Amino acid sequence: MPPRQPQDYDVCVVGAGFAGLCCAEAAAARGTRTLVLERQAAPGERPRTTGILVKEIADAWDFPARLTRRIHGVRLYSPSLDYLDLTSPGYYFLATDTPGILRWLGERAAQAGATIAGNRPYRGAEREAASIRLAGHDLRCRYLVGADGARSRVARDFSLDGNRHFLLGVEAEYEGIGGLDEDRFHVFLDSVHAPGYIGWVIPGVGITQVGLAVRRPHTPDLAAFTAKLATLFDFSQAQLTGRRGGLIPCDGVLRRISDHRVLLVGDAAGMVSPLTAGGIHPAMEIGRAAGIAISDHLLEAAPHPLRAVRQVTPSYLAKRMMRLAYDTLPMPDRAWNILFRSPLFRHLAQTIFFHHRGLLSFEAWRDLLRLTRGA
């Protein structure tokens, strides 16, 4: 028998998360033969993200209402459990059924023509004359997209930059928590339980999500944090229904995210806010832009896709500076409690949670000055 010939694709996307699926949908819709390799059986199995969507991405995508619920404000707690209610007229967040949203994105990609291959982990790749051969799968592609998470193996195999600094997040899913304002994203500043980041309680879709993330090398103690929350909320009827968690890169966007026929997107490229750890918005937006640019590059001889990706990728300069300050000079709980009473702190928190044009943008400074003068 003649040797079996590998199956050929234009684009192979490693990872069926937010970035990978949006990239695959955009590429397939434009006529490229697109494959998504996913190590789980299907998109949405064992998600690692909390799944909060900001209004900007909710406006850009028509998410099914059954998979989301609106939250109109943030309740920000000091370590002593004093709190500020922060809102912005017309603004909201979306809590999501995260597995359901990922399944929906997978269905969209498949409807656009992409092949979603579950239980197909990435096992390495090597270059050939005009393509990339994927080890263990009898596959070749003209372009490889690494959307394989914070510790990307695609990045390692092709000598691209990798994330070095991480937050470690853990989250428990409950039914039956009482005494909770369900129109607030509850955020907790706590240098003991959440050094380097925050804790949170989110009234989600059919569940309540309780989590915290810490700066590595700290280890999150979710049980101790939950015990503190029991002074605010009623856990007497709560039933644990699931857990999720994982690493969150906090270096900012990596510099070398592309080679001749390889591109990193999403967490693999560090496309996560170093301060807020928000990664779904850039994952979807930049993932889609990458899919369009790769298709144009392959089918129309357009410039290298990295150029288009860089044009829509935020620099996160202000947030990287604030992350550096936060890590270099960690705030003890007593200092947080004092700062919490400052009007300037409230206005800065308002800007961080509700301003998505960048903290160094003209619009952000204008709004911050307006808020301060109105205090």
Image (cartoon, helix red, strand yellow):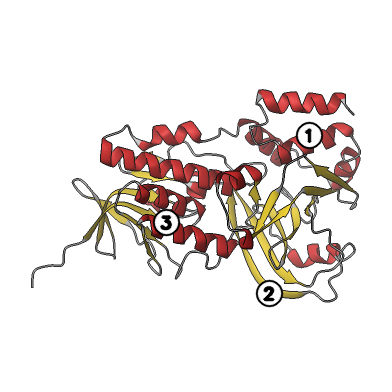
Using the numbered discs, state the Cα–Cα distance from disc 1 to disc 3 in whole angstroms.
Answer: 39 Å
Tag 3 or tag 1, which sits nearer the N-term? 3
Residue mark closest to the camera, 1 vs 3: 3
The residues bearing labels 2 and 1 have C-alpha atoms spaced at a distance of 36 Å
The amino acid type of the residue labelled 3 equals: Ala
Q: CA distance from mark 2 to mark 3?
A: 29 Å
Q: Quadrant of residue 186?
A: bottom right
* CA neighbours of label 3 inside 10 A, class few (<14), some (14 to 19), many (20+): many
Residue 231 at x, y percent in the picture = 90, 64
290 with respect to 357 (left or right): left
Mark number displayed over residue 19: none
Foreground of the two, 335 or 170: 170
Q: Which quadrant holds the C terminus?
A: top right
Residue pointed to by mark 3: 109
What percent of the width, then of the height, locates residue 283? 52, 47
Residue 296: quarter of image: top left
- Compared with 105, 327 (above or below) is above
Q: What amino acid is at disc 2?
A: Thr
Question: How many labels, in total?
Answer: 3
Q: Which residue is identified by label 1?
A: 348
Give neighbour class at mark 2: few <14, some 14-19, many 20+ (Cα, 10 Å). Answer: few
Answer whether labels 2 and 3 touch (C-beta < 8 Å).
Answer: no
* Disc marking residue 241: 2
Front: mark 2 or 3: 3
Residue drawn at 35 percent across, 51 percent down: 28
Q: Type of residue at label 1?
A: Leu
